Amino acid sequence: MDEALNRIHETVKQASLLARGQSVTRRRKRNPLKPSAKWTAPARVGRERGTALAVVLSTIGCAHARSDSGGCTMCSYLLDGTQEMPASEQLVEQFETAMVDLEGKEAPFSVKIYTSGSFLDPAEVPEEARAAILQMIASDDQVKEVVLESRPEYVEDAVLAEVRRILGGRIVEIGMGLESANDLIRTVCINKSFDFEDFKRSLETAKRHNIGLRAYVLLKPPLMTERDAMLDAIETIRVAQALGVTTVSLNPVNVQNDTLVEKLWNRRKYRPPWLWSVLEVLREASKESDGWMRVVCDPVAAGKIRGAHNCGKCDNEIVQAIRGFSLNQEASVLQKPTCSCVHQWQHILRHEDTSQLIHR
Amino acid sequence: MAEFRVGRGHDGPARIGELILGETTFETPLLTSHQTKNQHIINTGTLGRDEVSEGPMIVSLPFISDINDLELDLLRQDDVYLLPYLSSFGSLSSEAPATILDYQAQISRSLSSKILPSQMILRVPPEIPLDSLSESIKQFQELGVSGAAFVFNGQLGPEDMRAFELRSRLPLSMMVVALGRITPGMIPLLHYYGFDIVDISHGEEAATQGVRLWKKGPEKIEADRSHRYCPCSSCATLSDTDNLFDVLDGHNQETYRVALSESIHAMESGTLRWLVEGSTHNNTAMASLLRSLDKTLYTFIEEFTPTIGTGTLPLIGPESYNSPAVRRFREHVALRYTPQQGKQIVLLLPCSARKPYSDSKSHRRIAEVTSVVFGSIQPHVAEAILTSPLGLVPRELERVYPAAQYDIPVTGDWDTEEIAIGAQALSAYLKKFDKSAVVVAHVSGGYLDIVRAAEDEIEQSIVYTTHESRATSSESLENLQETLVELKEVLAIQNEPRTALRELVSATADYQFGSGTGSLLVPEDAKLKGKPYRMVLCHVEGEQVCSYIAETGTLSLTLEGGKRIASVGRYWVRLDVDNVKGGSIFAVGIQEADPSIRPGDEVIVVNKKNEVIGVGRSEMSGREMCELNRGRAVSLRHKVG
């Protein structure tokens, strides 16, 4: 990137740090024996109907978010973590607590381990904790699918070889925040601090171990118009599909505390995406996916002012369509919703581009 | 090709011009929107994302890291392009606005291998400090970027105010674009402030929400409710609810076009300011905006406000008190006007509806009284007319613009601000007279309130002659006569030769060219002849130096007159040639000009040796003469050779 773009990126970085403020060092103290969150839900596991367990381990959080590079502009997930690094045994116990929830639920199971950071980062989840947690999963034959999360820098052959060895023949996916296939947008608007090449390398590494890649695609980072954002998400999904990711998870931005997005939103300089945009991206994605790549979307705070929303009248119907599509990959449900606010959205798509006025 | 040309004519910074794009010439001010088939509206769209119209468009470029990220084969030679931008980026830090401008400059440099810089419009970040914009804009000017775009959120609050302030910092030759949420009611104000292209997409936005726009505000159209009658062709099918969006969109575009037509017409007839003042009654936000703008950007709008005008100038409400022509008049009277020496009586009079005041019945009756006492010769009596919002008009200046043109609603009551304005003007005026002079206040009602309010500041003794009844009542007039007779005796005023013409020309010279010029143009030995209500010629040593034209209340200089006042160093226009040819001087030929020149001013043309080579009337402001590369700058009256 050239000089002006570097200055633009530096500005975003500093602004992101500023928005984060003291929030990172003033995180509340949590019980190191309990995960930040856990929930189970009926889900499609492989080709069968089963139950998914999601657990958010309470760790010290994402290394990028903790660093002085400002973290990502829309993310404050690390505030779910804890100030002090939990010991390995404590992390394992957190996981154990969550696994109990699967007892008596409809098998097969899918287990998703989130950490508000990278599960594969040894500085966040020590190697012995990681091994113990994976062992615990390996000891339950009903678990058929495992999703881990990591930034690309921790995806290495040795680590994935270990994951594959412990989990045996289970379906394994690594969730990774690609966010955008466009380096400019990922860098300037998101401050993600890795390149598309890094993502590609991780994908190739994962493939060598028969591990799938679940690409998180962000819809509407800050500083972009509604249409910029929508087109970029569509293009990102197209690129991800061509590379061979196994799942695309579309994440419409929601306004999280102590982020640059929140700061802009407070000043009326940001609006979370329209649900119409979410629908449009999913429609385009399902055209691309040819049935092999899964496309899922579970918009956080959908229909609320801090999440993806429309006029208020049609939000519920659309969110249901989105959830329905995520569960069964049936694109026809995405065609159904109608509302008069679609004209307003269409106007905004064009007008934000030309005027650069944020429509809120 | 792409070229923006500023055309002739002024009413404040408002201007007309042309945007020439290939074979097509758009007249500015011009409206813009997307996907319109209307010939008078230029289309907008985003490169590679929107439908391309057959005719020229304003195309926005998406944010990119390198111009090769663009679909370069879509670029056309007859379109203009809005440079890439990053929404809201300017708010991220204090350096961010300058950074995003540098980015645009960088893009425009590499883009100039594909399209002309004159096809490019930069986007001004709303957060940029004013001085920083003045600095940053230079790189675009050097490059030849032809326009700048500002964004309005339509709330008429501090952000929109900011866009006007930033606009005032642009080079004068740049095309100025207003983007964002703009209601029809804002059109006159934007035009007045010199915006050349205005985004009317809000009409479409309103239509998507079932809203019909009118000049004064929106109207929600609901299926089962009755709505306002509209004669426009689009609204003929308003009952067609399946097609409501198109109907409303059509109507809304029509409303904008009508607003623009009205605004252009007002500018041509010199009443744009009046139209703008009227629009403040659309809503309170509009009123606050104009008042703040008048305060903050006075110097900007004043610079382009003509000093001459024809036709009536209606000054209706508080928005007029500080309109540029009015405030400038007050300031000139306070700073430039110099009364003739030896005035022993200062007679204060009320204004009249008829202008000039001398032509009114009331002033004629007062003149009868003064001539009974002094004959028609009053070299020791000064007359001044109290009025609002001009404050005070010395009799000699009653034909100057806008004293002879203004028209106000007359009730006899003045509000507090008007009284303060009048009192300030009065006390400044009386400071120009000897302390021993006597002030005869032949005024009542609100006028009297003005004198009372100024009393503490007045050092002369004051005689009130109306006993609070009307100034033109027989009782008041008798009283005035008695007072004057008495004063004549007490002050031992002798009848002396008439000096009215001398005073008229000298005071006008001071008002027009600055204090001291009166004595240069009308020295002791000057010979004056003519009628104050028609024309007065002034000769010095057998040569005519100027003539007073009653119709405009101003002086026209001869070359000799120009030479006499050239030494004052004002109102000069410097050319790079020895002599002038033809009847006009164009901006392109002007090397330097006095920045205090306003459109309509009498100016002196000098060559590089500072010799006077012509005199004439300016058609633009001094700064425009320097910055613009085309257009008539001076209409010559006399020239050497």
Image (cartoon, rainbow, N blue to C red):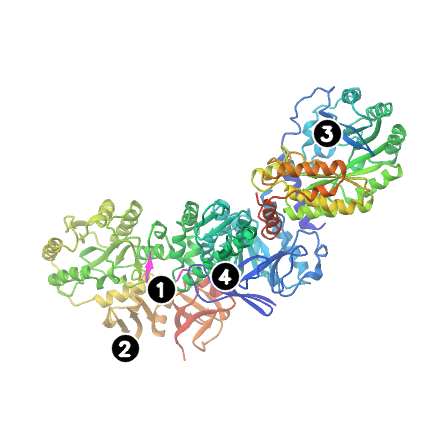
Tag 4 residue: B29
Q: Residue at x 67, y 32 (%)?
A: A76
Residue found at x 32% / y 68%: B555
Real-space CA distance between mark 2 and mark 3, rounded to the nearest whole angstrom? 96 Å
Q: Secondary structure at mark 3?
A: loop
Which contiguous range is marked in magenta? B305-314
Q: CA distance from mark 1 to mark 4?
A: 22 Å
Mark 1 vs 2: CB contact within 8 A: no
Q: Which residue is mark 1?
A: B309
Chief SS of the magenta region? loop
| Residue B492 screen position, x and y as percent | 11, 58
Q: CA distance from mark 4 to mark 3?
A: 56 Å
Amino acid carrying label 3: it is: Gly
Instruction: Name the residue carrying label 2.
Output: B542
Label pair 4/3, CB-CB below 8 angstroms: no
Query: In the image, is B615 to the left or to the right of B354?
Result: right
**Circles 1 and 3 in contact, beta carbons < 8 Å:** no
User: Mark 1 is on which residue type?
Assistant: Gly
Report the residue marked by disc 3. Answer: A61
Q: Does A104 appear in magenta?
A: no
* SS for callout 2: loop
Chain identity of mark 1: B
Please check whether the numbered discs 1 and 3 fall on a single chain.
no
Whether residue B309 is in magenta: the answer is yes
Residue at 70% across / 19% down in the picture? Answer: A31
Mark closer to the observer (1, 4): 4
Residue under the point 20% across and 55% down = B349
Looking at the rendered structure, which numbered label has been put on residue B619?
Answer: none
| Quadrant of the snapshot with the N terminus of chain B | bottom right
Location of residue B391 in the rendering, given as x and y in whole percent from the top left corner: 29, 53
Is disc 3 surrounded by few (<14), some (14 to 19) or many (20+) residues within 10 Å? many
Chain label for disc 4: B
